[in-house]
Amino acid sequence: MAQVLSPGALPEPEPQMKKEEEWRENLNVRMICKDCREDPPNLYEDHASGDLICADCGLVLQQRTIDQSSEWRTFSNDDQGNDDPSRVGDGPNSLLNGAQLGTGIAFGDGGQRSRELSRAQNKSNLDKGNKVLLQAYKQIGALCDGWQLPGAVSDTAKHIFKDADESKLFKGKSQEALIAGCVFLACRRNGVPRSFREVMELTKVSKKEIGRTFKLLENFLMKREKSHEGQSRMVAGGVVVGGDGYTGSSNANPAELCRRYCSMLDMSQKATYLSEALATRTGTTGALAGRSPLSAAAACIYMAGHLLGEPKNAKEIQGVAGVSDSTIRHAYKLMYADKDKIIDEDMKRRGADPSRLPVPA
């Protein structure tokens, strides 16, 4: 019913229905023995009989309690002979296709009938798509373990391979080249870049084929991100994930390469920081414009070692960076010509002495 109000008067609030409060357990109520009346009570639960008993007088306070503990106990040495009592399987794997729900028939006693049943089930449940993916994931994991890369690189490479396999754009391409391209791209995306030459030596795939596959993967991921910008997508098992926001990968950063190469050369932390600073300055000044990141990183390490009195000759750096000593000396010659622009006052305060630099031939 509408209210008639005089000027300046406020309407009365409408009465609201009182909401019923949800039931909550009163944690202030505690069970104690009615004979002992000790507080706190000394109670223990007998799991064999399901009774709650007072430990002082033996009075049974509660019967047939529900056991909340595990149904079985599993030990590492008990899972022999297929006697694992677990009745649940693995969780859904977003890297595989399908619902991944199935029943496995064990060999049992190893009789003829058990073997026939297991063989028949394996034939009926054979998923060729997942079989190819599992083989590729195993190979990606082996490559990443060979480089001792973090798990994030392996997972990224597997997701890239799955997306590429589902797109059908790489049908007919060599699987080894596709795996090499995925690992190369995953290393760049996770800040641990590797050169084409290093990937070629690890995967035995030609550098030209790796570069071609890498470009195709870049274009595919860029187009997919552009068409699904800001959208989430569903993977196996009904798991919804957001877009990965891929914006393309730039060229390898010489500063990141310097950090890894200095570690392999057992150089001091001071020399590592100085080589990274030199690599950053050369990119700013353009002293090594047009040079490959490998030769730029090698030349920066060569200069940093001489600036701090910890020189490394070109032969030592060549074995780590994978570039010839003549290439290192030529890049160093370009840096030496612009040393006044590259070596700033902060580097000099950190111990860099330009007078220690050898004059290039």
Image (cartoon, grey):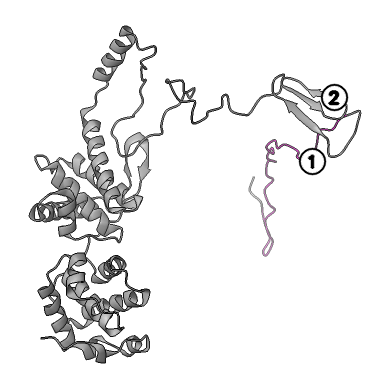
- Specify the label residue 204 is tagged with: none
- Magenta segment: 4-33
- Quadrant where the C terminus lies? bottom left
Of residues 107 and 319, the one drawn nearer to the viewer in this rendering: 319
- Quadrant where the N terminus lies? top right
Quadrant of res 278: bottom left
- Disc 2 marks a residue whose amino acid type is Gly
Tell me where residue 305 appears, x and y as whole percent.
27, 79
Tell me where residue 112 appears, x and y as whole percent.
30, 8
Of residues 237 and 76, the one drawn nearer to the viewer in this rendering: 76
Instruction: Find the distance from the CA under tag 2 to the CA under tag 1.
Output: 24 Å
Depth check, mark 2 against mark 1: the one in front is 2
Helix, strand or loop status at disc 2: loop
**Position of 2 relative to 251 (above/below):** above
Task: Tell me what residue is drawn at x 22 percent, y 87 percent.
Answer: 357
Magenta region includes residue 6: yes
The mark that comes first in sequence, 2 or 1, is 1
Helix, strand or loop status at disc 1: loop
Please, what is the dominant secondary structure of the magenta stretch?
Answer: loop
Quadrant of res 280: bottom left
Task: Tell me what residue is drawn at x 12 percent, y 56 percent.
Answer: 211
The residue wearing badge 1 is 28
- Specify the label residue 58 is tagged with: 2
Residue 208 placement, left or right of 115:
left
In the rendered picture of this protein, how many numbered marks are placed on residues?
Answer: 2
Q: Is residue 17 visible?
A: yes
- Disc 1 marks a residue whose amino acid type is Asn
Q: Residues within 10 Å of mark 2 (few under 14, many from 20)?
A: few
Q: Residues within 10 Å of mark 1 (few under 14, many from 20)?
A: few
Task: Tell me what residue is drawn at x 63 percent, y 48 percent.
Answer: 2
Residue 349 placement, left or right of 4:
left
Tell me where residue 15 appears, x and y as whole percent.
69, 45
